[in-house]
Image (cartoon, rainbow, N blue to C red):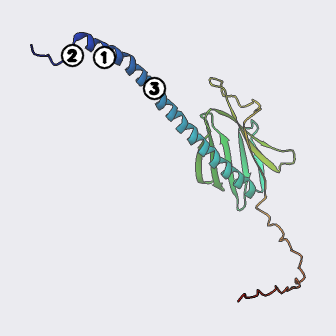
C-alpha cells in the first residue's frame, strides 16, 4: 500500500485554530506599537518646540528694554531698540505665537506648539523678570485664561540683561613668580 502525502482535516483545523489565536494578538501588538510610536514622536516634537521657545523667549527678554503683560496674562510685549517690539501670545489651539515688528511692519511671525497646556505670562513686582509658565491641562478641560498655573515649566529671564554692557572685570596683577631650581642628583653609572 502506498503512503499518502498531505494533511488530514484534523491537522488543518488545529493549524487554523492556532493561527486564529496568534494573529489577533500580533495585530494588537502592532497596533499598540504604532500608537506608542506616534505618541513618542508627538512628545518629542513638543519637547523640541518647548526647547526652542525657551531659548527664543530668554534671548528676547534679555535683549528687551522693558516688558508688559496683557491684562488676561495670555500675552507679553517686549520693547527692544530701534522701535522694535516682540509680541508673545497664547493661542487657544495649543500654540504660542511670536511676532516681531519694527514700527507697524511685521518682520517675522512664528508659532511654537506646546500642546494641551495652560500658558501664562507674568512679570515680577519690579517689572524686571519676565516669565512664561506652561502647565499641563487635564484632557477635556476647557480653555480658560484666568486659571492659575500651579505646576509645570517656568521659563524666566531678566529684562535688559544684554542691553547694557557689563563693566570689564579687572584682574589684579600678579607679582612675577620667583623661580627656584633644584638640582637633582646625577645618576651614577655602574661598570
Secondary structure of residue under mark 2: loop
In the rendered view, would you say 129 is above or below 164?
Answer: above
How far across and how far down the image is residue 50, in percent?
64, 44
Closer-to-camera residue (86/31): 31
Earlier sequence position, callout 3 versus callout 2:
2
Closer-to-camera residue (11/59): 11
Mark 3 or mark 2, which is nearer to you? Answer: 2
Label 3 CA crowd tier, 10 Å (few <14, some 14–19, many 20+):
few
Quadrant containing the C terminus in the rendered view: bottom right
Mark 2 or mark 1, which is nearer to you? Answer: 2
Label 2 CA crowd tier, 10 Å (few <14, some 14–19, many 20+):
few
Earlier sequence position, callout 2 versus callout 1:
2
State the residue at coordinates (67%, 29%). 137
Quarter of the view holding residue 24: top left
Label 1 CA crowd tier, 10 Å (few <14, some 14–19, many 20+):
few
Q: Is residue 23 left or right of residue 4?
A: right
State the residue at coordinates (79%, 58%). 161
State the residue at coordinates (59%, 45%). 48
Quadrant containing the N terminus in the rendered view: top left
The label shown at residue 29 is 3
Earlier sequence position, callout 3 versus callout 1:
1
The label shown at residue 161 is none
Would you say the residues marked 3 and 2 are in contact, meaning their CB atoms lie under 8 Å apart? no
Quarter of the view holding residue 28: top left
In the rendered view, would you say 61 is above or below 15?
Answer: below
Q: Which residue is mark 1?
A: 15
**Label 2, label 1: how far apart the Cα atoms are:** 11 Å
Closer-to-camera residue (162/8): 8
Would you say the residues marked 2 and 1 are in contact, meaning their CB atoms lie under 8 Å apart? yes
Q: Which residue is mark 2?
A: 7
Secondary structure of residue under mark 1: helix
Closer-to-camera residue (186/139): 186
Amino acid at each position: 500500500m502506498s503512503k499518502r502525502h498531505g494533511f488530514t482535516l484534523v491537522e488543518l483545523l488545529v493549524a487554523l485554530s492556532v493561527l486564529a489565536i496568534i494573529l489577533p494578538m500580533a495585530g494588537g501588538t502592532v497596533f499598540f506599537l504604532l500608537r506608542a510610536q506616534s505618541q513618542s514622536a508627538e512628545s518629542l516634537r513638543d519637547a523640541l518646540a518647548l526647547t526652542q521657545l525657551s531659548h527664543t523667549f530668554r534671548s528676547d527678554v534679555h535683549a528687551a528694554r522693558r516688558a508688559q503683560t496683557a491684562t488676561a496674562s495670555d500675552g507679553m510685549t517686549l520693547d527692544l531698540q530701534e522701535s522694535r517690539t516682540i509680541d508673545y501670545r497664547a493661542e487657544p489651539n495649543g500654540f504660542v505665537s511670536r511676532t516681531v515688528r519694527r514700527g507697524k511692519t511685521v518682520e517675522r511671525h512664528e508659532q511654537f506648539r506646546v500642546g494641551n497646556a495652560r500658558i501664562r505670562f507674568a512679570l515680577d513686582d519690579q517689572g524686571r523678570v519676565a516669565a512664561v509658565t506652561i502647565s499641563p491641562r487635564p484632557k477635556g478641560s476647557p480653555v480658560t485664561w484666568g486659571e492659575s498655573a500651579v505646576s509645570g515649566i517656568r521659563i524666566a529671564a531678566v529684562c535688559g540683561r544684554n542691553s547694557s554692557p557689563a563693566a570689564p572685570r579687572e584682574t589684579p596683577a600678579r607679582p612675577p613668580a620667583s623661580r627656584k631650581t633644584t638640582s637633582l642628583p646625577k645618576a651614577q653609572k655602574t661598570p
